[in-house]
Amino acid sequence: MPVREILLLGNPELWRPSAPVVNIRSRETRELIGDLAATLDTFREQNGFGRGIAAPQIGVGRRVIFLNVGESFPLINPKITRASREMMEMWDDCFSIPNLMIRVRRHAQVEVEYTDEHGAQRTMKAEGALSELLQHEIDHLDGILATDRAIDGRSFAMRKVVK
């Protein structure tokens, strides 16, 4: 599966909402999942971090995200079905906005329904860092970037790159 170029802030494709995946078992869907996995793995090897990537970040307007959080797997047509009232603040980062950290508020816990790569319906309950990650990646599917979620105009900082 080829490693794809990650679109950067300013590319209008990043603000377009994604269409649902209709045929989970299609060759197109399998190839997209493979490309997301390869792109995420390569990013992690080159940068030493990275937990998730969404299809719009590689220029594909489909509702698919791929996570590597101890295990690697895709979430197809994910949807947040429950979110806690409790919020948390954190510095968010994004492959599409390299070296920029954005202070955002996210729900402390979420429940996400999705389809796995075999067509099975699944539910994932998440809190803390995983909750934040799911919200970030699902935002990408809705055409929302972390910059759109900034708490205020002072909620931006540059990441110090260590070589």
Image: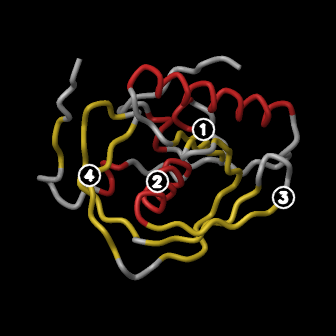
Q: Earlier in the sequence, mark 1 or mark 2?
A: 1
Contact flag, marks 3 and 2 (Cβ < 8 Å): no
Q: Nearer the viewer, residue 9 or 105?
A: 105
What crowding class fits label 3: few (fewer than 14 Cα within 10 Å), some (14-19), or many (20 or more)? Answer: few
In three-dimensional space, the C-alpha distance between marks 2 and 4, rounded to whole angstroms, equals: 12 Å
In terms of sequence position, does the residue under pointer 3 or pointer 2 come before the other? 3
User: Is 141 located above or below residue 3 in the figure?
Assistant: below
Which of the 4 image quadrants contains residue 107?
Answer: bottom left
Tell me which amino acid carries mark 4: Trp
Q: Earlier in the sequence, mark 1 or mark 4?
A: 1
State the residue position of label 1.
Answer: 55
Q: Please tell me which of labels 3 and 1 falls first in the chain.
A: 1
Q: Quadrant of the N terminus?
A: top right
**Circle 3 sits in a helix, a strand or a loop, which is it?**
loop
Q: Secondary structure at mark 1?
A: helix
Could you say which quadrant of the image residue 9 lies in? top left
| Closer to us: 15 or 151 | 151
Q: Amino acid at mark 2?
A: Leu
- In the rendered image, which residue does mark 2 sit on? 133
Outermost residue toward the bottom? 85
Q: Position of residue 83 (x, y in %)?
A: 49, 76
Residue at x 17% of width, y 36% of height? 158
In the image, what residue occupies the spot 69% across and 67% down?
123
- For the residues labelled 1 and 2, the Cα–Cα distance comes to 15 Å
